[in-house]
Structure formats: structure tokens, C-alpha cells
Image (spheres, rainbow, N blue to C red):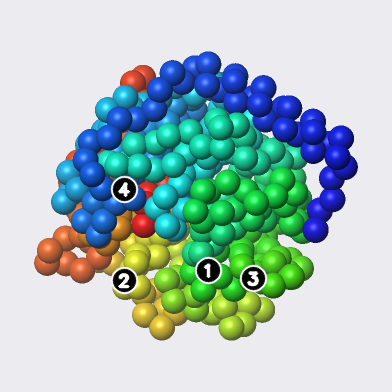
């Protein structure tokens, strides 16, 4: 376990308090309740999008309800943040939202109608070596895993599934093969974590939410021949396969988790794949590409992908993420660009896997809306 001196812990807490006051100065209140539905249900989801300020600093947090295909902004949203947001994640128990910023990670409880309330006495719950580049939470809502921008340190912070607050200020950590993390993924079975490392390929690590060895030693997975960078990674819902999106060659690569030494196959995507979504039912895989504003769609069976007839699908300018709602009926893509930058899709009723644009909106009150992270309740 990573060790810190008493003095450094004291400094960490002091910085947390000062940083929190700075952030809260630009955030007088959070969201008001719109119904009596904490955490969402199978037909109602909550969507959270962070946006970078147009001046390059600060930013906003936008929140929406998605009920029966209707996307509605929660009262008081978007909220102005005093520090620049960098990442966002919803705990699998739908009780907590964690927002990574240039000052550290903040905790919010998710209440009625998706309403957010600052947790941990409005102080930072994690202060890493740099700002959080990507975050995931294990399926027990007991571990917050953080990859930090420009750092080879991968941290696993134990958190309480009841309060959302870390149970220690000292995370367990391992050193990655490079200080270039782009995106994290965790297998639903809680047995593996993957870190896309840009030009340095991808690291695979064993993981266990119980026991002494929480994070295993990183195992490097080399880039595909001709690829320039691994920027996207995801696992399927059965924890049997991992998908890696790589630029230059513009491919999605498929591996079986039972043997990560060689890829099963690779498939062409749009230009610069940045986000991968295996759908919750296990039938399709979608890849958002930032350079040509597209989502490539594939049917998926036994580790093999087949391009959907209507693929690719148009999406927001410079997409940064694609997510699926808890009812498994809708997809959303957010973009770092011109309005409208949040696109909501339904699945076509007659052609399997085809995405139909249902509605579009903007995540900020300015144009362009520079969304840089999106998360949805489970």
C-alpha cells in the first residue's frame, strides 16, 4: 500500500479544504428534486455531463433526467464549477457521483430526481499527483480506480458503498508502463482493469475487490501494427472480451480475456476512435470517432464483429463519449464542439442495431459546448 507521512496527510486535508472553498465559491446550490426516484429505475436514468469553460478553465456540470425517451434538464443545471472538470463516473449502486477536476475528486450524493448534494463536508475525497484523467468504480461500489493525467500512478481508493466517502486517505497504487493514460475500463466481473496508454499501447491488470492483492502487476498489450495510439478501451457485459480502439490505423481490436497475448480480430472504425460502448444486452458494439463525427456500429457474437448495414451513424461534433441508459433502450453521445452537442438515439424498431436520432440538445449555455466527460446511472 502506498505510504504517506502524517505531515503529508495533514497537508492533503488542508489543500482539500481550501480547494473545496474555491470550487464552492462558484457553486451556490445544486440541483432540486423533480420526482421521488433516487438513483433511477429501469425506465428512468440520470445523465451527467461535464463541460470545460470556453476560456480553457473552469467549467460546468449539466444534469438530465431521461424517462421513456424524454430528455429533460434538471432545474438549476448547468452548474458553474470554479475548477476545470476532467472526468465523471456514477457508482454502480446509483447513489453517488464522482467528479474529477483540476483540484481533485469531489463526491456528490444522487437523490430524488437525480438531484446532487455535495458529500464529505464539501471537501475533496481524493487528491492525486495530477488531475484525474479517467475513473471507474467496481461493481460493488467499494473501489474508485483513478488514472491521473501525465502520471504512471494508477490508484485504487477504497470507498464506502453506504456513504461514498473513502475509508482511507491512502490509496493502493501500482506503476503503469507509461505516464500516458487515456481511458480506463473495468470488467463487470471485477477481475480485470485495462488502461489505454496512447502511443504506449494498453496495460492489463488483475483486480479483486477483496483480499490483499487489489491491483496486479500491469501486463503490456502492444499496439496493432501501424497503430499510433490506444485511446479507447471497454469490456463486454459478460467479462469475456475486451475491445481497444486505436488511432492512425483506426481500428477496434478484440481480445478474449482468457488469452490477452493475441487479438482475435481487428475491424475498421471511423477516424480517431475515442469511445467504445458494448451494449448492455450483448448484441452490439458502438465506436465513437472524434475526427469524423461518427459512430460505427457492429453486431457482436462470440467475439466477432460485423458492420451494421446503416453504419456509420452521424453524431455530435468531436464526440468524447457514448453511453446507454438503464432501460437499455437509448444511447447518448456527447461532443466537444458546436451545439447541439448531446445526441440521444433510440434503437430502430425494424433494423437491429440501427441508431435513430431522437433528439439533440446543448450541455452548456454557450456555443460551442465543450463536453469532456459523460456518465449515466445504471
Tell me if 353 is positioned left or right of 135 in this view.
Answer: left
Where in the figure is residue 276, as x and y percent of width and height?
Answer: 45, 58
Q: Name the secondary structure under disc 3.
A: loop
Q: Mark 4 highlights which residue?
A: 38
Q: Is residue 75 above or below residue 349?
A: above
Q: Distance between the residues labelled 3 and 1?
A: 15 Å
Q: Which of marks 2 and 3 is nearer the N terminus?
A: 3
The span from disc 2 to disc 3 (Cα, nearest Å) is: 28 Å
Residue shown at the point (32%, 24%) measured from the top left: 76
Of marks 3 and 1, which one's residue comes earlier in the chain?
Answer: 1
> Which of the two labelled residues, at mark 1 and mark 2, occupies the earlier sequence position?
1
Q: Earlier in the sequence, mark 4 or mark 2?
A: 4
Q: Would you name the residue on which mark 2 appears?
A: 281
Asked whether the beta carbons under mark 2 and mark 3 sit within 8 Å of each other, the answer is no
Label 3 neighbourhood size at 10 Å, few (<14), some (14-19), many (20+)? few
Q: Where is residue 213 in the image (x, y as percent from the top left)?
A: 73, 70
Question: Is residue 208 shown above or below 373?
Answer: below
User: Alpha-carbon distance for marks 4 and 3?
Assistant: 28 Å
Q: Mark 1 near mark 2, Cβ–Cβ under 8 Å?
A: no
Q: Residue at label 3?
A: 210
Q: In this view, does 15 lie to the left or right of 334?
A: right
Q: What element carries label 4?
A: loop
Precedes in sequence: disc 4 or disc 3: 4
Q: What element does badge 2 sit on?
A: loop
Q: Disc 3 or disc 1, which is closer to the eye?
A: 3
Q: In this view, does 318 lie to the left or right of 179?
A: left
Residue 186, by quadrant, is bottom right
Using the rendered image of the protein, determine whether residue 129 is visible from the camera's viewpoint.
Answer: yes
Which circle marks residue 187 in the picture?
1
Q: Find the distance from the CA under tag 1 to the CA under tag 2.
A: 15 Å
Q: How far apart are marks 4 and 2 (CA)?
A: 24 Å
Amino acid at each position: 500500500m502506498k505510504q504517506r507521512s502524517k505531515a503529508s496527510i495533514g497537508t492533503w486535508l488542508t489543500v482539500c479544504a481550501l480547494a473545496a472553498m474555491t470550487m464552492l465559491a462558484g457553486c451556490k446550490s445544486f440541483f432540486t428534486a423533480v420526482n421521488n426516484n433516487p438513483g433511477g429505475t429501469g425506465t428512468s436514468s440520470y445523465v451527467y455531463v461535464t463541460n470545460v469553460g470556453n476560456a480553457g478553465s473552469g467549467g460546468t456540470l449539466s444534469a438530465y433526467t431521461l424517462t421513456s425517451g424524454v430528455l429533460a434538464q434538471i432545474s438549476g443545471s448547468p452548474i458553474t464549477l470554479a475548477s476545470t472538470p476532467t472526468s465523471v463516473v456514477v457508482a454502480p449502486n446509483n447513489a453517488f457521483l464522482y467528479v474529477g477536476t483540476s483540484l481533485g475528486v469531489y463526491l456528490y450524493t444522487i437523490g430524488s430526481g437525480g438531484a446532487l448534494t455535495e458529500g464529505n463536508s464539501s471537501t475533496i475525497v481524493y487528491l492525486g499527483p495530477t488531475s484525474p484523467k479517467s475513473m471507474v468504480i467496481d461493481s460493488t461500489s467499494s473501489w474508485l480506480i483513478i488514472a491521473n493525467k501525465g502520471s504512471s500512478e494508477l490508484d485504487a481508493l477504497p470507498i464506502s458503498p453506504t456513504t461514498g466517502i473513502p475509508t482511507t486517505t491512502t490509496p493502493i497504487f501500482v506503476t503503469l508502463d507509461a505516464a500516458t493514460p487515456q481511458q480506463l475500463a473495468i470488467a463487470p466481473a471485477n477481475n480485470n482493469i485495462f488502461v489505454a496508454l496512447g502511443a504506449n499501447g494498453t496495460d492489463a491488470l488483475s483486480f479483486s475487490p477483496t483480499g490483499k492483492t487489489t491491483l496486479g502487476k500491469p501486463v503490456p498489450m502492444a499496439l496493432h501494427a501501424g497503430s499510433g495510439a490506444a485511446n479507447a478501451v471497454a469490456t463486454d457485459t459478460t467479462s469475456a472480451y475486451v475491445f481497444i480502439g486505436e488511432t492512425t490505423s483506426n481500428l477496434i481490436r478484440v481480445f478474449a480475456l482468457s488469452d490477452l497475448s493475441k487479438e482475435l480480430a481487428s475491424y475498421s472504425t471511423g477516424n480517431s476512435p475515442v469511445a467504445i460502448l458494448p451494449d448492455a444486452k450483448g448484441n452490439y458494439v458502438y465506436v465513437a470517432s472524434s475526427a469524423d463525427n461518427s459512430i460505427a456500429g457492429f453486431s457482436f457474437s462470440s467475439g466477432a464483429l460485423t458492420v451494421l448495414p446503416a453504419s456509420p451513424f452521424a453524431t455530435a461534433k468531436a464526440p468524447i463519449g457514448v453511453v446507454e441508459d438503464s432501460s437499455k433502450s437509448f444511447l447518448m453521445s456527447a461532443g466537444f464542439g458546436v451545439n447541439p452537442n448531446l445526441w440521444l438515439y433510440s434503437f430502430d424498431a425494424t433494423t437491429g442495431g440501427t441508431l435513430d436520432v431522437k433528439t439533440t440538445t446543448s450541455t452548456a449555455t454557450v456555443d460551442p459546448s465543450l463536453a469532456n466527460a459523460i456518465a449515466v446511472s445504471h
